[in-house]
Image (cartoon, grey):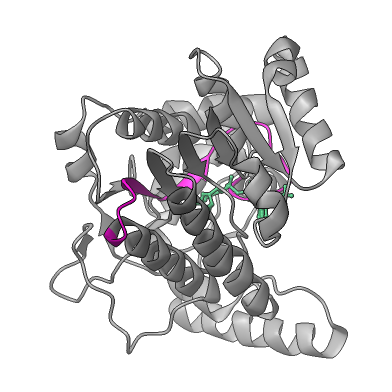
Amino acid sequence: MILITGATGLVGFHLMQLLSKEATPIRALYRLEAKKDHIKNLFKAQNQLHIFKQIDWFQADLLDIPSLELAFQDITQVYHCAALVSFEPKDHIALYKNNIVGTANVVNLCLAFGVEKLCHVSSIAALGNGTEHQLCITEETERNNELHYSDYSISKYGAELEVWRGYQEGLPIVIVNPGVIFGSGFKNSGSSLFFTKIKKGLPFYTKGKIGIVAVEDVVQTMYLLMNSPISGERFILVAENPTYHQLFCILAKAFNVHPPKWHASKVLTAVIWRLDWIFSTLFFTRRKLTKAAAQSLHNEEFYSSQKIKSTIPFEFSPMESYLTKLAQDFK
Ligand SMILES: NC(=O)c1ccc[n+]([C@@H]2O[C@H](COP(=O)([O-])OP(=O)(O)OC[C@H]3O[C@@H](n4cnc5c(N)ncnc54)[C@H](OP(=O)(O)O)[C@@H]3O)[C@@H](O)[C@H]2O)c1
């Protein structure tokens, strides 16, 4: 039986759709009934309610070891998709617990139950950094510990270290490092927020680059890697590296709205994140633009997916047509 953590999230949902075509039964981890109901509605909307009903839904938190232990009974493969995705500085302890401790618990139970293989969903946020002379990031690029990293980046890096520890202790593993993932079904979170902002008419753009990928490509590569003899490797999953301006123009065209007109310089975004910090400190609101997010808007680094392309027979979906279709569905 296959275990999927984070089954109520974007990646988990699309992975269930893919794996349901195979004969091996699926056990899906969830925490809240409301989130499970959302997934039920997504399956229902695609006339796939029978798939939802075939799945063995299991309520457990990654931090609750006794219930997680029960979820591991009879499991042969684990796809670990669960994580807290947040760039809010106030979430630093929650990020540490959910992403690092949660992953350590998954790895320990994989070892204890003799799981055949673990596929861990990491992120490009866990990778190293480019330099002025080397802007291309690969799986081998090292992290520069003198740079400022977001708490999310640190938590995803720490989670990967737990997976590498499991590998050292004898657990077969593969790690994927996707860029920003686009996909259907989750309108109010993650990359869908780009759609909401552009649809409303975003006036500003930056010239930084963003690594992007379609969720269907992420889950397809996870499946292919899991069912291959490959182990002890990580793979960047980035289909394309457009600038924010290029990405916003594609979305604006799809929504038939004006593309962003004004270039936001580094100085302007530095002023905005500081004002945002003052506002959120005074009024206890969630941050809209953190220091790390502001810096990433000007990032000139780009990600190479050469390793995955030369390892398995796979082509990424062209992103302009994918995003245009997604935006039409979003409308
Ligand atoms: N989305 C992206 O653009 C992106 C890019 C690169 C990498 N990733 C990585 O891809 C993975 C999946 O991301 P996603 O986009 O699917 O995120 P998502 O939609 O926010 O889903 C996250 C999932 O993790 C679950 N979860 C979080 N903490 C948990 C805990 N302590 N115990 C049990 N379940 C827990 C959530 O459960 P609830 O529904 O109960 O909250 C949810 O099912 C993550 O590892 C993320 O870091 C995402």
Residue 207 visible to an observer of this rendering = no
Nearer to me, 221 or 66 = 66
- Which residue is pictured at 68% across the width and 31% down the height? 330
Q: How many marks?
A: 0
Pick the residue in front: 118 or 12.
Answer: 118
From the top left corner, tell me how far across and down residue 111 is, in percent.
43, 52
Q: Give the percent coordinates (x, y) of residue 54.
A: 69, 16
Residue 176 among those drawn in magenta: yes
- Picture quadrant where residue 266 is located: bottom left
Q: Is residue 230 left or right of residue 319?
A: left
When the figure is inspected, residue 312 is found, relative to residue 165, above or below; the finding is above
Q: Residue at left 28%, top 61%?
A: 168
Q: Is residue 135 magenta?
A: no
Q: Is residue 80 above or below residue 151?
A: above
Task: Identify the image quadrant of residue 90.
Answer: bottom right
Q: Residue at x 53, y 83 (%)?
A: 270
Left or right: where 301 falls relative to 44: left
Q: Quadrant of the C terminus?
A: top right
In front of the other: 226 or 71: 71
As drawn, 294 above or below 224? below
Q: Nearer the viewer, residue 57 or 313?
A: 57
Name the spot of residue 28 as percent of width and height, x first.
65, 35
In this rendering, does residue 191 appear at all? yes
Q: Which residues are magenta?
A: 168-191
Please name the residue shown 32% across and 46% down the image: 174
Q: Quadrant of residue 144?
A: bottom left
Q: Position of residue 311 (x, y in %)?
A: 17, 35
